[in-house]
């Protein structure tokens, strides 16, 4: 659990893609788009589109992978 918390506050690893056991994928472009609930340790995800947040139990997370920004050719 601690490693997940550390990953989510490290801006250098963003953007991230989280895949859930249901197959859903969620993009986290910046650490401001996610936080850990202080009591339950669930992830609260704030997507770019829509007014709602998504609460995810960390046990539902299958993978978290960094999405590298593509280098732009000059």
Image: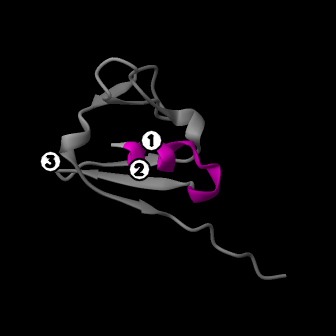
Question: How dense is the environment of label 1, judged by Cα within 10 Å: few (below 14), some, or many (20 and up)?
Answer: few
Residue 14 versus residue 41 in the image, above or below? below
Residue picked out by circle 1: 5
Question: How dense is the environment of label 2, judged by Cα within 10 Å: few (below 14), some, or many (20 and up)?
Answer: few
Gap between marks 2 and 1, in whole Å?
5 Å
Q: Are marks 2 and 1 in contact (CB under 8 Å)?
A: yes
Task: Report the number of discs.
Answer: 3
Q: Position of residue 68 (x, y in %)?
A: 57, 68
Image point (44%, 48%), residue name:
27
Of tags 3 and 1, which is closer to the observer?
1
- Is residue 73 in the magenta section? no
Which numbered circle lies on residue 22?
Answer: 3
**Which secondary structure lies at badge 1?**
helix
Q: Main secondary structure of the magenta part?
A: helix
Closer to us: 56 or 50:
56
Q: In the rendered image, which quarter contains the C terminus? A: bottom right
Residue picked out by circle 2: 3
Residue 53 versus residue 64 in the image, above or below? above
**Residue 36 image-quadrant placement:** top left
Q: Are marks 3 and 2 in contact (CB under 8 Å)?
A: no
**Which secondary structure lies at badge 3?**
loop
Image point (63%, 49%), residue name:
11
């Amino acid at each position: 659990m601690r490693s997940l918390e550390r990953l989510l506050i490290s801006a250098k690893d963003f953007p991230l893609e989280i895949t859930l056991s249901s197959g859903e994928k969620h993009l986290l472009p910046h650490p401001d788009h996610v936080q850990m609930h202080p009591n339950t340790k669930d992830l609260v995800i704030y997507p770019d589109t829509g007014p709602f947040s998504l609460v995810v139990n960390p046990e539902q997370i299958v993978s978290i992978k960094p999405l590298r920004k593509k280098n732009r050719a000059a």
